[in-house]
């Protein structure tokens, strides 16, 4: 998605303190190019989820670095994590992204 195509940041109403705090956590989590790539890779995967084991090579980053970024995204509520045996699988929390789009007044999310 190209940023110019997203009708964003048109607040319909003033955010209360809790909404602003919640949104700031999400935006901080997304304020890193590696994390944005992770979200886009996971969201666009044909299966809708990706094994953590596939991400270090795809990103050209070390496993501990990728794990750190994934943890930040899970903590912000953007990704869901499921342990399957030895590996963790990640999927985008589409409801959470819908809430974010709603707060930002974005359409097409």
Image: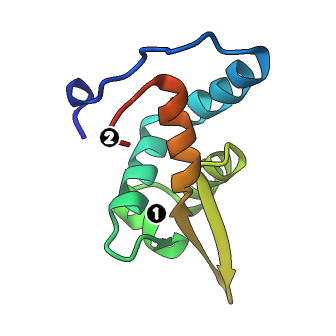
Does label 1 or label 2 sit earlier along the sequence? 1
* Mark 2 crowdedness (10 Å alpha carbons): few <14, some 14-19, many ≥20: few
Q: Which of marks 1 and 2 is in front?
A: 2
Tell me if residue 80 comes above or below residue 76 in the rendering.
below
Q: Nearer the viewer, residue 36 or 98?
A: 98
Q: Nearer the viewer, residue 23 or 27?
A: 23
> Which disc number belongs to residue 56?
1
> Which disc number belongs to residue 108?
2
Secondary structure beneath dot 2 equals loop
Q: In which quarter of the image is the C terminus?
A: top left
Residue name at image x 38 percent, y 77 percent: 47
Residue name at image x 39 percent, y 29 percent: 106
Residue with the most extreme top position: 14
Q: In which quarter of the image is the N terminus?
A: top left
Q: How is the image coloured?
A: rainbow
Tell me if residue 56 comes above or below residue 19 in the rendering.
below
- Percent position of residue 48, x then y: 42, 70
- Percent position of residue 76, x then y: 67, 43
Q: Nearer the viewer, residue 61 or 97?
A: 97
Give the Cα distance between marks 1 and 2.
30 Å
Q: How many marks?
A: 2
Secondary structure beneath dot 1 equals helix
Tell me if residue 3 comes above or below residue 90 in the rendering.
above
Tell whether 62 sits left or right of 43.
right
- Percent position of residue 107, x then y: 35, 34
Labels 1 and 2 touching (C-beta < 8 A): no
Residue name at image x 69 percent, y 19 percent: 20
Q: In which quarter of the image is residue 15?
A: top right
* Mark 1 crowdedness (10 Å alpha carbons): few <14, some 14-19, many ≥20: some
């Amino acid at each position: 998605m190209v940023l110019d195509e997203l009708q964003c940041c048109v607040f319909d109403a003033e955010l209360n303190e809790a909404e602003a705090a919640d949104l700031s956590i999400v935006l901080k989590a997304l304020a890193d190019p590696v994390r944005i790539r992770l979200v886009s890779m996971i969201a666009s995967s044909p299966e809708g989820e990706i094994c953590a084991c596939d991400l270090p090579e795809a990103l050209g980053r070390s496993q501990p670095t990728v794990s750190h970024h994934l943890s930040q995204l899970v903590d912000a509520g953007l990704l869901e994590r499921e342990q399957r045996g030895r590996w963790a699988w990640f999927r985008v929390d589409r409801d959470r992204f819908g809430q974010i789009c709603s707060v930002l007044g974005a359409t097409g999310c």
